Image (cartoon, rainbow, N blue to C red):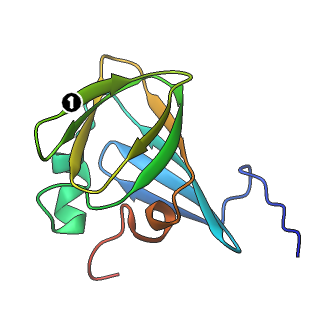
Amino acid sequence: MMEVKTIEKPDERRDFPKGHLEALHLTGLDFAVATFEPGWHWTESVGPLAGTASCEVHHNGFVVQGRMGLRMDDGAECEIGPGDVFVCPPGHDAWVVGDEQVIVYDFAGAMAQEYGRSQQS
């Protein structure tokens, strides 16, 4: 079965402090466009919704705009920016670097199902 959807008409939108996520749900794939404003930091914006010390979602992503810092629970750290394709396993923190909005396309099924959703949802 073939499925086609457009990011212009997401299936859902989740708002959280200093950012939001727009998700498309297809068979075998959840795709999300995540937008993070300057000052966004996972531990402050999404952590309270997740109820965990660090992000426990696996991300397969592509950075469209802006720069983001990533730090794994083991201390490994990197910075990603426009044109970067990345894989980030569970157990990390993230934050916007600088004053530019960050836009990330995420192809991991878990992100669109769990990310930015309160444990009570």
Residue shown at the point (51%, 26%) measured from the top left: 84
As drawn, is 102 to the left or to the right of 12? left
Q: Categorize mark 1 by other alpha carbons within 10 Å: few (<14), some (14-19), many (20+).
A: few
Quarter of the image containing the C terminus? bottom left
Q: Position of residue 110 (x, y in %)?
A: 45, 66
Q: Which residue lies furthest to the right in this view?
A: 2
Q: Position of residue 20 (x, y in %)?
A: 44, 50
As drawn, is 27 to the left or to the right of 44? right
Residue shown at the point (52%, 21%) measured from the top left: 82
Residue shown at the point (23%, 66%) measured from the top left: 50
As drawn, is 103 to the left or to the right of 57? right
- Residue at which label 1 appears: 77
Q: Using the image, determine if residue 118 lies above or below residue 14.
A: below
Secondary element under disc 1, as helix, strand or loop, is strand
Q: Using the image, determine if residue 87 lies above or below residue 113.
A: above
**Residue type indicated by callout 1:** Glu
Q: Where is residue 48 in the image (x, y as percent from the top left)?
A: 17, 61
Count up the numbered dots: 1
Which image quadrant is residue 23 in?
A: bottom right
Q: Which residue lies furthest to the bottom in this view?
A: 120
Residue shown at the point (43%, 27%) measured from the top left: 101
As drawn, is 41 to the left or to the right of 7? left
Q: Position of residue 114 (x, y in %)?
A: 40, 69
Quarter of the image containing the N terminus? bottom right
